[in-house]
Amino acid sequence: RSTQGVSSAASDVYKRQSRAIAGTFLGVALVTWALYVAGVRGGENSGSSSVEIIDKAFSAGPQGIVNLIVTTVVLAPIYEEVIFRGYMLPTLTKFMPTTAAVGASAVIFALIHEHGIGDTVQLIAVGLATGIVYARTRNLGASIAVHATFNAAVIALFALWVS
């Protein structure tokens, strides 16, 4: 096989992965927007919604924000994607169709977080997005990138919202 053929194949894979990441991220963003419009997203006064957790981190000052970013943009996406898309999703596909496995892993992913209804719906969308990306690309790095980008966007939107 020529070097040009390998380079072209790698470029095609990169383009497909990029489209999958962008498409699923936009889908999750639309779900999030719809939840805000419906009034079921945001501080739910339970002490555990993502908005309340982010607010506590911002209230703690620069160190709280740094800890939040390291935890939610770096560590959580790696850890959670290894578990849910790297292990659980392939295991579930041994017992059910890929579509059902993506859905089941997304619901479990959301419920593990133990947040309010708005967060749970949003997390199901994130789980579906990352599951679809992984199922289409078979690249755990791609699902980690979607997850990390989503978490970073939530933090950035919160920062804009409160400023």
Image (tube, rainbow, N blue to C red):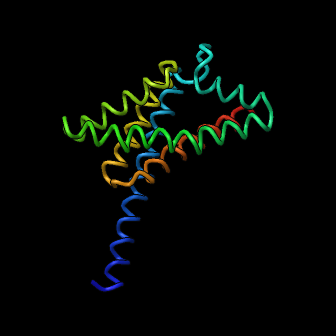
Residue furthest to the top: 46
Please tell me whether residue 74 is drawn above or below residue 138 in the rendered image: above
Q: In the picture, which quadrant includes the C terminus?
A: top right
Give the side of residue 36 with respect to residue 15, left or right: right
Quadrant of the rendered structure where residue 64 is?
A: top right
Give the side of residue 21 with respect to residue 72, left or right: left
Residue drawn at x 50%, y 40% as measured from the top left = 79
| Residue 106 x %, y % | 37, 33
In depth, the one of 124 and 161 nearer the eye is: 124
Res 153 seen here: no
In depth, the one of 57 and 78 nearer the eye is: 78
| Residue 159 x %, y % | 70, 37
| Residue 118 x %, y % | 49, 23
Res 112 seen here: yes
Residue drawn at x 74%, y 31% as measured from the top left = 58
In depth, the one of 156 and 74 nearer the eye is: 74
Residue drawn at x 54%, y 27% as measured from the top left = 36
| Residue 49 x %, y % | 58, 22
Please tell me whether residue 146 is drawn above or below residue 42 in the rendered image: below
Quadrant of the rendered structure where residue 157 is?
A: top right
Please tell me whether residue 114 is drawn above or below residue 18 in the rendered image: above
Instruction: Please give the count of numbered marks on the rendered protein.
Output: 0
Give the side of residue 10 with respect to residue 34, left or right: left
Q: In the picture, which quadrant includes the N terminus?
A: bottom left
Residue furthest to the right: 61
